[in-house]
Structures are given as structure tokens and as C-alpha cells.
Image (cartoon, rainbow, N blue to C red):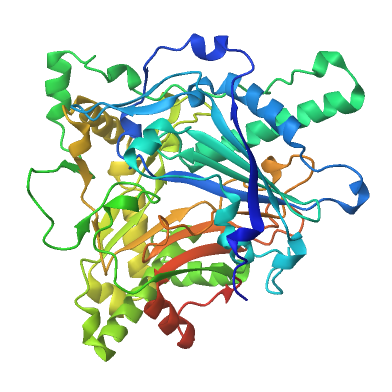
Amino acid sequence: MTAASSSSVTVTAEHIVHAAHPSSWQSLPSPFPLGPMDHYVTISIPVQVVFVYRRPSSSSSEELIPVAWLKRALERLLDYYPHLTGRLEVHPTTGERSITRLGSGMGLYEAVCSDPLDAFVSSALPSGISLQQLPGSGNALLAPFNPAFQAVCNDPLFAVQHTRFACGGVSLGVRVLHTIADADGFFQLVRDLAEIYRGLLEAEKTGNPTSAVPVLAQMPHFKPYMSELMGGNMTTEEQQTALAYKPSLFHIEEDGKTASEGQAMPETMAEIGDKVTMAPEAPTTGHFLRYTGNELQDLKDRATDPSGKGWVSTFEALSAHFYQCVHRARVELRAKDPSFGDISPTDFLTSVNLRTALGPDLPPRYFPQAVFAPWVFIPPEILADGPLWKVAKYAHDMMRGPAAGSRDSINGTLRWIAAQPNKSKIQSGFRFGSGSFMISQWSKTDMYSGATFDTRPILVSPPFTAISLVDALLYTLPTEDQGTPNDTGDIDVAVALSAPLWQFLVQDGRYMGGRIID
């Protein structure tokens, strides 16, 4: 099957939604400073996800997620996240980012799809709905987005597109700029929106005026960590001490210097975007694979040191397995066709949530960006001929090393970032290219139950976009059974690979394992 044309979706209305109470953003400093962790993500990269809801047969006469109720819920949500009413600003000299024009509002788009959800079914998926078959492969269900610098600074930080299908089903395409929030914060925002919406729904059903303004059970924390150090607020002594620290993940770009091997890339998984200048000539294709709980356990067993020393997580085992598969395929492809060129340095990069390592330094329900992306060079001979457990050990040691696992190391790096006179020159040492591999873990995130509005979503997934279709960029995702009695620990993997590489892996059945579902 091929994806439905995006022409089946029509945007019928655009709204700027403001906070229910202007005092929520009027009490904030303007400009609202971002913190060091918000400065190593390319500003044009969003976190964006499509949530699909089928109208229950028991409520065929009721409208699913009415736009008016969604708008009211968004207004109340902005009271809790008032900085999302502003616009991004980047200082032209220092590269420092802040939020200005508070009170400008977020974007809400209404759209309709002329097809029912059943037009996008896939026999390979228990839920029946295939993201790849949805209009524009899911992209048409997202609010319009322009990644150009000026547009990113002038458009809303936060946008939602509500699309109603011919059957009455609904999708919500939610987007937040990655420099404002990581995946953890993004899904917290969606869960809070759903909680407020359900509170409105309950008030409507009970007719109880005292519950007409729902209150979140727990307040979010949206002030960025160490933002008080920004804007020249460090003393000369503090700045000198911070600059003396030598971070392992970052360096300052030298004027006029270009990478000789591979392409140095920005820091986080989703932030490939406009800085990818070495993408392969062949087009990149996106697919979804599903690994069963039993398959994952087998991978984990094979990825564990046979001596009995140490351990690996399921994510580390799966990451090692996939990188080894991809590298071996790259080697064999080049042996058959030298025109593919040399393989760049075999750098492995993943994302690590810093909330655990920073512990008490970050308040509960911390919303802003809080991810480092550590990387490690894995010798190509280990990838080509070594046992899986040796590859997995590189991943394990890197993810749990001091760069992203030590509170003191992380804080030293963040102070170093805050002290930089020009933050636009901060670069990661990771070398993106024809030999690199990048993977991010979303599979432990609550993507389904917390996103219940009138009903639980039947599909939650980030679409493949022009930004995320980068060779060897992967995400692990939970399945639609997450948190239900049917959850057996399966994991979906969103895989972007160059078309020749993907074709080779599909034809050579000895490699990937799993099952192609989309």
C-alpha cells in the first residue's frame, strides 16, 4: 500500500489560543531566559507526534474531542505553562536563547479528512491503523511548520492540529520546539492537557459548576535549570572557573574549520535538520519494525558478557544489535558496489535523560529540555566481526559513564555552556556520516494511557518527516498495548535508513530480526 495523499486533509480554521488567565504569563520575566540545556538543540527541530482516536461505537451520537472543549483545555493548560504563549528569540551576538512576546499565544488548527480511519488499515497491525498509510504518512495531520530561522522565531512554540475523519475519529498532531522541551516534557504536556480535558468533560457531565475549572493534580516545573546563570549573570570569577572545565561531549567550533572525517553534528537525537550536509545521495526511507518480548530477551541474553560480569539493558542490547546489522550491511554493500564510498567513523550516539542523574537538582515534573546525547567510537572491526556482547558493552559503558551519568560532570558541562560568550559555537564531537548510528529511547515513556481524552488513543507515533528521515536514525517506541493486560513487552522501532541499505537488509533475512509492520 502507498500512503494516502495529503490532499484528503483540509485545514478549515486557524486559531491563536491564549492563556485563560493573562496573569499567568504577566508574572514572568520578559525576556524569559532559557537554560544551558536548551542551547545545544537546533532551534528548527520540533518534537512532534500524532495521536489517533477512534470513536467508540457506544457513543456514535456524541462528537469525539470537540474542538471547543479542546480549545478550553488548551487555554487552561497555558496557565500552567505560560511561557509557551511566547516566541523564541536568539541573541545575534551571544547566541543566547530566550522567550519574548509572552502572551502571543499557541497555534490550534482545525482540519477534516474526507476518508474514514478504516481507509488506512494494515493487516500487520493489531490496531488496524497504519501511520504510514495515513495522509502524508502522518505529516498531513501535523500543524503547518516552517523550519526557516525567522519563521521559527515568529511562529508559536506550541501547536496542535485537530483533524476529524469522515467516520468521526480524530487525530491530534502535537508539536513543541525541541529547544523548549524534550520527549519526556512533551508527553508530560500532553498528559496534562488530557487531564484538564477530562476535568472539563466531568464538569459537563455532572453539571457541577465548582469543577468547571479543572486543576492539575501536580504542578509542572517550567523554569529551565541554571537559567539564572544566563544573560551575563555570572561573575568574572564564576565564568573563568566554568570555562576552565573540559567537557567530553562538547567543544567550541573554530572559525573556518571543517570536519575532515564525517560531519560533526549537534547534540540530540532529533536535531539533525538543516545541519546535515553529508546525507547520502540515495533517498532515505522510513519503516517500523516490531520486536516481541521473547525476541528482546534473546537479544539481551546474547548481549550479556558470557563471563557473567556486568549487565546490559534491553535498549542497549537492541541498539547494539541494530548497529551491528547496519554496519555489516554497509560493509557488504560497499564490497559489491564501491561507488557507495568509504565508511565514515563508526560513532554511536544515543540520548540519556538527565533527570535521574541530576536527582534533587531537578524538581519533579521538570518540563524543559533535559537530555544529553553521549557518543562513543566503536571500532569497525568489533562491529563487523565481534560478538554482540562486546558491541553492547560499548553502549552500556558510554550511557552510564560520567558525561551523562555523573551529577558533578553534568553540572560542570552546563556551567561551561552558560559561561560561553557565543553559544552558537557549541558543537558536539559526534561525527555524523555514512558510518554513524543514532538511536533514542521512547519505549519507556507513557505515550498511550496518559493521552486519554474521551477515549484511549489507538495509535501514537512520530511520523517520518524531512527532518527525521536521516540515514541510521532510530527511535524505540511502545506498542498500542502499552499499559494494558495485553502488554507482553513488545517494542516498535522507527527505522530511517538509506533506501539501498534498507533493501539489502530486507532481502538478506539473516540480519535484523523483528517483523516489518509499516
- Count of marks placed on residues: 0
Determine if residue 157 is in view. yes
Vertical side of 76 occupied by 306: above or below: below
119 with respect to 265 (left or right): right
Position of 67 compared to 469: left or right? right
User: 224 and 51: which one is in front?
Assistant: 51
Q: In the image shown, does 188 or 58 lie closer to the viewer? A: 58
Q: Residue furthest bottom?
A: 336
Q: Looking at the picture, how far across and down is residue 215, in whole percent? A: 70, 20
Position of the C terminus, as image quadrant, is bottom right
Residue 123, image x and y in percent?
A: 71, 74
x, y (%) of residue 239? 16, 21
Seen at 22% across and 83% down, the residue is 339
Where residue 216 sits, quadrant-wise, is top right
Residue at x 57%, y 62% (from the top left corner)? 137
Task: Say which quarter of the image contains residue 320.
Answer: bottom left
Left or right of 129: which side holds 204? right
Image coordinates for residue 227, horizontal then vertical, percent: 34, 21
Residue drawn at (46%, 23%) of the image: 86
Furthest-left residue in this view = 256
Q: Quadrant of the N terminus?
A: bottom right
